[in-house]
Amino acid sequence: MADRLSTMDSSFLYLEAPNTPMHVGSLTLFQEQPGVFDHESLVALIRDRIAYVPRYRQRLREVPGRLAHPVWVDDERFDVTYHVRRSALPAPGTIEQLHDLVARIMSRPLDRRHPLWEVYLVEGVQGNRFALLSKTHQAMVDGVTAVDIGEVILEESDQVRGAPVSTWRPAREPSTVELVAGALGDAVAHPTTLVDAVRSSVDNARQAVGDAMATVLAATRSPEPNPLNVPVGQQRRFDTVDLRLVDLKEVRRQRGGTITDVVLALVAGAMRSWLLSRGDAVPQDAVIRTLVPMSVAGGDGSISLVDAFTLDLPIGEPDPIIRLQRITFDTTRYGESARPIGAKAMVGIVGFAPPTLHTLGARVGSSLSQRSFSLTVTNVPGPQTPLYAGGARMLSAYPIIPLAPRHALSIGVTSYDGGVFLGLNADRDALTDLPVITQGLVDALVELRDSRRPPAVRHLSVAD
């Protein structure tokens, strides 16, 4: 029997538009070592490891008449080289050039005729580095039946471990008659499934799904108007910030709160600086309502689910220490009463969990009413020891969180091997001044820690 998409997974397809593609990305930088890693090595690595993520060899098949949600079917013409691509930066290969390439690639929707993922090897990055850029549709990754491809290509040693012997043969694709029969069978067993599927095919499906999901946060008021709540175009800007985890820990030691509280205080300070730089009024009671998806540890210490809450970042507060104290108070209060929203259990995930957790965080944001918040900030802690892909050492990892309609900015944060790495995905036209925000994040950390000893903002090398 074909594996049918859930209502939530299907909603990411129904609500997708050319200006708001619903794929999550990850940009990782590696130290280049001659003869250790190239495009052929990446293709071979993914071909070997894809057995761990069989969803990545499946594509979507629509049910005639939309009598039910689409199903996953094995791609009989699956070609890993279609999905694993190669690019290179022109000399000198600056980080700014890499950001431009990432923005262009992430702006393009995935082709639904193929499995919904791509990985790019980007060569020629300044400093003897190369990058891996991944794109995975939110409909694919639920943390249980499928995880992000980044989970299986990274390992804790520079010695490449063996892969399972591949015996995969694509299953026969169901016929049209079988698809219809399966849809009718599911409708008898689960009558509401047919209603949901039919609703998705009418012209007002987008509004219907949005109204239904709005009830999740019905008790919250709409966010105050701000320059983030604008129509989103098809093109993106991307920028990154590198911080040191020890600096955030020092702020936590001096001022209290958690690392997540400190990150949110940095975002609040950066957004305040950005608005002031534009000449916008920032009254003392001004806030930016922010969705904060968070990974939550289960009883045995494993990451078991993704939780989310909305938080009013106090951007009108001029004192950075008071901003942090207010955020800490609110996150503590939410932590005592928050409940899981829209994400499945993640028991048993191994490897580099942040890519999957960021995807689940993005799924939470995409499943909620977009009128309930203005900004999404995902923060996922990663391992504090080096990781490798095909023997090459990973230096940094930047999440790329998709934009929702009328949401011009999203921020993903990951800590890894002593660094804290932020990826900022923005609408190209709405945030022509995105560097002001990235600099504001750095300045906000200086404010909170010690303005006489600013943190180093750079891309980490192997020597670090």
Image (cartoon, rainbow, N blue to C red):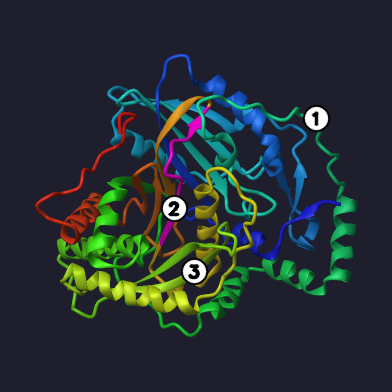
Residue 159: name its quadrant.
Answer: top right
Query: What residue lies at 61% left-to-right and 74% top-to-bottom?
Result: 208
Report which residue position mark 3 lands on.
308
| Residue 267 in the figure: left or right of residue 416 | left
Give the alpha-carbon distance from disc 2 to disc 3, as whole Å.
15 Å
Query: What residue lies at 56% left-to-right and 80% top-to-bottom?
Result: 215
Q: x%, y% of residue 456? A: 21, 43
Q: Nearer the viewer, residue 43 or 397?
A: 397
Q: Tell me if residue 22 can be seen.
A: no
Q: Residue furthest left?
A: 452
Nearer-N-terminus badge (1/2): 1
Nearer-N-terminus badge (1/3): 1
Report which residue position mark 2 lands on.
381
Q: Is residue 436 shown above or below 132?
A: below
- In magenta segment, residue 381: yes
Give the alpha-carbon distance from disc 1 to disc 2, as whole Å.
35 Å
Q: x%, y% of residue 187? A: 84, 68
Residue 169: name its quadrant.
Answer: top right
Q: The residue tagged with tag 1: helix, strand or loop?
A: loop
Query: What residue lies at 45% left-to-right and 54% top-to-bottom?
Result: 380
Q: Specify the label residue 176 is tagged with.
A: none
- In magenta segment, residue 385: yes
Q: Is residue 423 shown above or below 403?
A: above
